[in-house]
Amino acid sequence: MSVESEYAVKPIYQKIAIDIANRIITGDLSVGDRLHGRSSLSSHYNVSPETIRKAIILLNDMDIVEVAKGSGITIKSVDNCLKFIKKFRNMDFLNLSKKEILDLFKKKNELEKEIRKKINEFTDYSNRFINSNPFMPFEFKVYKGLEIVGKTISESRFWQNTNATIIGIRRGRDLILSPGPYAVFKENDILLTIGEESSYCKVRKFLYGDDK
């Protein structure tokens, strides 16, 4: 069963109990009235007597009706109907919120998976056509102690110094695509850059000087 169907579908007996509670609230049924027997209710709602039994148990547990042997089912409280309806509305809201959050996480994971796939395809394509591709991707690691650590892309004047564009930053398991000028360089970042062939040496010199 999908997440959506799990949260959208209530048991039939619960729907019947809610319907009876609503009828009491609207005045269709009054305190002191007696409900029809199980067989009549099962015929009215077109369900089995067992389903009606479960609905009545639920209403009895919520102190909305009173079930007495020989006296049948008597309506006991309107106020408890309101509490009952509110309870299930709150449950519906919580279930819906949970479903929405799970759906968003699912979409996020699918999007990240697609992004990684495209980056890998781009890298693979560029490596196979390295001699004919005017803009090649390069990867550079940000080591501890480098001058750019703690600076933003704008502050480092990365493009002005290298003629290369940063298209992404791998940070642990995360991939930051198209980082803006205020993205901050951190230790162990992997910079994904594109530029002309000459940009490789410029980026290397800019980051590492003559030490790497």
Image: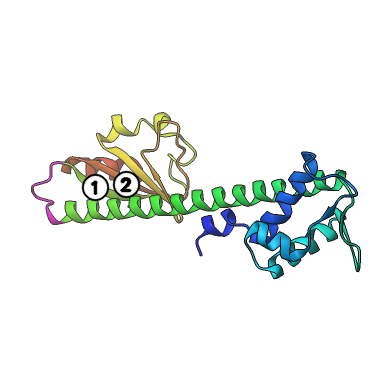
Q: Residue at x 46, y 35 (%)?
A: 151
**Pick the front one: 117 or 82:** 82
Q: CA distance from mark 2 to mark 1?
A: 7 Å
Residue 103 numbered mark, or none: none
Residue 129 in the magenta stretch? The answer is yes
Q: Is residue 74 left or right of residue 88?
A: right
The secondary structure making up most of the magenta span is loop
Residue 177, can we see it?
yes
Q: Nearer the viewer, residue 112 or 54?
A: 54
The residue depicted at 62 percent of the width and 61 percent of the height is: 46
Whether residue 143 appears in this view of the structure is no
Does residue 120 appear to the left or right of 29 in the view shown? left
Q: Secondary structure at mark 1?
A: strand
Q: Secondary structure at mark 2?
A: strand
Going 14% across and 56% down the picture, which residue do you hit? 128
Residue 193 is left or right of residue 106, and the answer is: left
Identify the coloring. Answer: rainbow
Q: Position of residue 9 (x, y in %)?
A: 58, 57
Magenta stretch in the rendered image: 128-134
Image marks 2 and 1: residues in contact by CB distance under 8 Å: yes
Identify the residue at horizontal 46%, vertical 55% (top origin).
172
Residue neighbourhood size for the residue with mark 2, other residues' Cα within 10 Å, grouped as few (<14), some (14–19), many (≥20)? many
Residue at mark 1: 137
| Residue placed under numbered mark 2 in the picture | 192
Of 12 and 160, the residue lying toward us = 12
Q: Earlier in the sequence, mark 2 or mark 1?
A: 1
Q: Three-letter amino acid code at disc 2?
A: Leu
Q: x, y percentage for residue 137?
A: 24, 47
Amino acid of disc 1: Pro
